Image: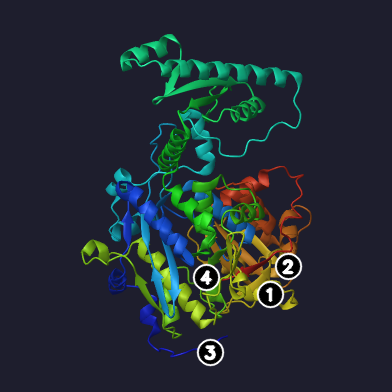
Amino acid sequence: MLQRRLFCTIAEANLHPNSNAVQNCGKWGIKQVTKSNFSESLDEIGARIADSDFIAVSLQTTGAYSSPWKRHLPFDTAEIGYLKARHAAERFQILQFAVCPFSFRASKVIAHPYNFHLFPRDELKVGLPSYSFSCQPSYLVSLAREGFDFNACIADGISYLSRAQELAAKDHIRNPSAPSCTILSPPSRSVADSIFVERIKSRVKHWIDACNDLGKKPEDVLISSLRRMISAIEVHGSRPCLNIDTCSQRQVNLVLETLKDFVDVVPLLIPANGSGIQTVRAILTSSQEDKDLFENELQDIGKEHNKRIRGFREVVELIASSQKPVVAHNSMNDFTFIHSKFLAPLPSTLDEFRNSLGSVFPHILDVKHLIKELGFQKNLNNIYVATSYLNSRFFAPVQVESTHQAMSTDADKVRSQGHSVVKISELFAKLCFILKIDPKTLGAIEEGHPHLPPALKCYANMFDSCSTSYQGSTNEEEEEVRLWAKRRERVSSKNMVFLWGFQSGISTGQLKRLLHGKHEVFAGEYDVRLVDDSCAVVVFRNPGFSEALLEAMDDLGEGCSSSSLKEMVSEGIRAARYDVYVKVCKLELWKPNLADSLDLALEEDESEDLSGMHNDEMIYLDDL
């Protein structure tokens, strides 16, 4: 553990942020962004992101879990933690998304914090992005206490579409767009292809000749318009256009390749309608200057169209395209929401999630993992508690300067999610100072992507709750559990048994007294923790005890000598191994009570082999 500096003996008062701590957050100016000022803020934050070293993000959602057992528990593996985070991301909604591009200048952090207010409004009338979402009452109460304006959020919140939803929406909107990629000609042409191309060439040539003939005659505008109508010449804006219907992507490519031979023609793609017919629209320009002007108009229209379609996702795309390191606190929770709301539906496994997210955000840093490197045993899930805890034990002369002017009104003194993202930037800078990491030494830029300093690479893209000091260890002592210890402990999942069917409202002590003497395994050392009101987990220190208990409960009708155990089972007590809990999460049996979910899992096909599901996982056992 690193040596403590300027240790303070009055740390306890700092561990519980109060109203004074909330007001101190007002020293930083946070730009609040809603639908009314989103367009101007988008260009501004784009420039800030381009000039920054890192980008901190923080979310305010409508909830995190709908039942106590669905929150991340100490004995959850990384895979189970992801499944729970995925369930929350699909169920709840983001109301605030704070972004803070920041850079280092000596011991000073230059921060540019923005707090975006979001609401999933169906502005395109296509049923996207969301028909409904859930709210956790405690989260809404917390937001109300912090002065959150729910009316402003609903009326002026910024909507958005994910990448997947944008593709679906384009089928409904059918706006013309320029070809977005290089057109590849078919490797070989069939006779039908050649006939199709010659027919398109002839049609386009006659159309251009007809347009040029009309343009040579000086006529009144009205007469010219009437002549165009009679000649069946359509217009796109003020320019002549020709719509060419196609039946396949191959024909689309053939048409686009053919139009290259006509220098004054600009092609546009009209998305396919319900019948699957896609149209290529050819626009005739009068000169090279007019062609350049029209292409610039298309770019401007495309940008405005993207703002309208993508909404807030434009900010996410700016962060992704910059390839800058992204700093977060509780990155698993935040980035499952980000993936679900702005990219695509979440994958079914953690590895698939890592790969999918890594292709968009290559460097994600979680300050929680940096904090664990200091040897803290305490779970610091609150960013304000983490900062106070760090300040009480270490000296890190880091000053944060916001480029936005701080306001002095009562509303601005209320802690918003925007201030949380500045605290993340500050905490990251202090941790780098304490751990002697120079964050300014970003590696050379290769192919436009900045590389992390070697000292930070080992902390990137970690989406599990395990301490870095335990990763990769194979020490047999990690199989042991030292009960009631203050430090983090490890226990094999084979030594765990889930127990349910007892009276609701029972305490841990009462349950342990109930189990005492029911079987010989309860004569040894074991631990009992309540998961929720309906279920508890029993952890045995001695290997094999969990299997002995489960076998005894299964074989009660075949000569079991324990009458006390028979009585307990007859009263409705049931038990299951850790594998059944894994099955509950994998099959998404998200009942309000864990006991009901375990019952459902046991009712599944008994022939399914559960023995290979995380039998050898090592999990952490902390106080629940």
Q: Amino acid at mark 1?
A: Gly
For the N terminus, the quadrant is bottom right
What crowding class fits label 2: few (fewer than 14 Cα within 10 Å), some (14-19), or many (20 or more)?
Answer: many
Local secondary structure at mark 3? loop
Q: Distance of mark 4 from mark 2, alpha carbons?
A: 35 Å
Look at mark 4 in the image and give the residue it sits on: 368
- Is residue 245 in sight in this rendering? yes
> Viewer-nearest of labels 3 and 1?
3
Quick one: label 1 or label 4, which is nearer the N terminus? 4
> Viewer-nearest of labels 4 and 2?
4
Q: Nearer the viewer, residue 518 or 284?
A: 284
Quick one: label 2 or label 3, which is nearer the N terminus? 3
Look at mark 2 in the image and give the residue it sits on: 545
Q: Distance of mark 1 from mark 4, alpha carbons?
A: 36 Å
Local secondary structure at mark 4? helix
Q: Residue at x 50, y 82 (%)?
A: 434
Q: Distance of mark 3 from mark 4, alpha carbons?
A: 19 Å
What crowding class fits label 3: few (fewer than 14 Cα within 10 Å), some (14-19), or many (20 or more)?
Answer: few
